[in-house]
Image (cartoon, rainbow, N blue to C red):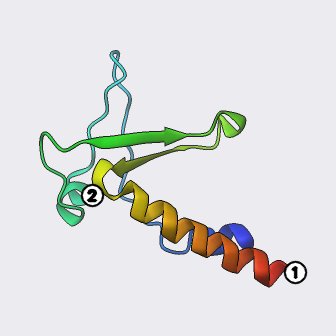
Amino acid sequence: MIIMEMFEHVKFYGCVTVGERGQIALPVNLRRIYKIKSGDKLLVLGKTEMENWGIFLVRAEILSKILVEFGEKMEEIIKKEK
């Protein structure tokens, strides 16, 4: 249940293939919805303990906002579990 709550707003935008140089192309629908343009800076986040779990791409300028919202959501989940 906790996992489902954490990902309730996650959407699937397609599949990409990593090229020889480690590059990927973001699906056009994703770029349109999130207004990602050429030259935009994206942070690539991952967690080594969960190496096979996944990665996140985040716009550099909104990382602090996302972290605050994530912290609040985690506090709610922890309170519900107690």
Query: Mark 2 falls on what kind of element?
Result: helix
Tell me the quarter of the picture where residue 71 sits: bottom right
Point out the tag, 1 or 2, that comes first from the N-terminus.
2
Q: Which residue is at a point 13% across and 39% down the rendered structure image?
A: 39
The residue labelled by disc 1 is 82
Badge 2: few (under 14), some or many (20 or more) residues near its Cα, within 10 Å?
A: some
Identify the residue at the far left of this view. Answer: 38
The residue labelled by disc 2 is 30
Tell me the quarter of the picture where residue 78 sits: bottom right
Identify the residue at the far top of this view. Answer: 20
Q: Nearer the viewer, mark 1 or mark 2?
A: 1
Identify the residue at the far right of this view. Answer: 82
Quarter that holds the N terminus:
bottom right
Whole-percent x, y for residue 79 in the image: 77, 81
Whole-percent x, y for residue 15 in the image: 39, 46
Whole-percent x, y for residue 66 in the image: 44, 63
Q: Eyeballing the image, is 80 above or below 44?
A: below
Foreground residue among 28 and 56: 56
Quarter that holds the C terminus:
bottom right
Q: Decide if residue 37 is on the left or right side of residue 71.
A: left
Q: Eyeballing the image, is 48 above or below 42?
A: above
Count all numbered tags in the image, as a single digit.
2
Q: Decide if residue 79 is on the left or right side of residue 21.
A: right
Q: Which residue is at a point 62% across and 39% down the rendered structure image?
A: 47
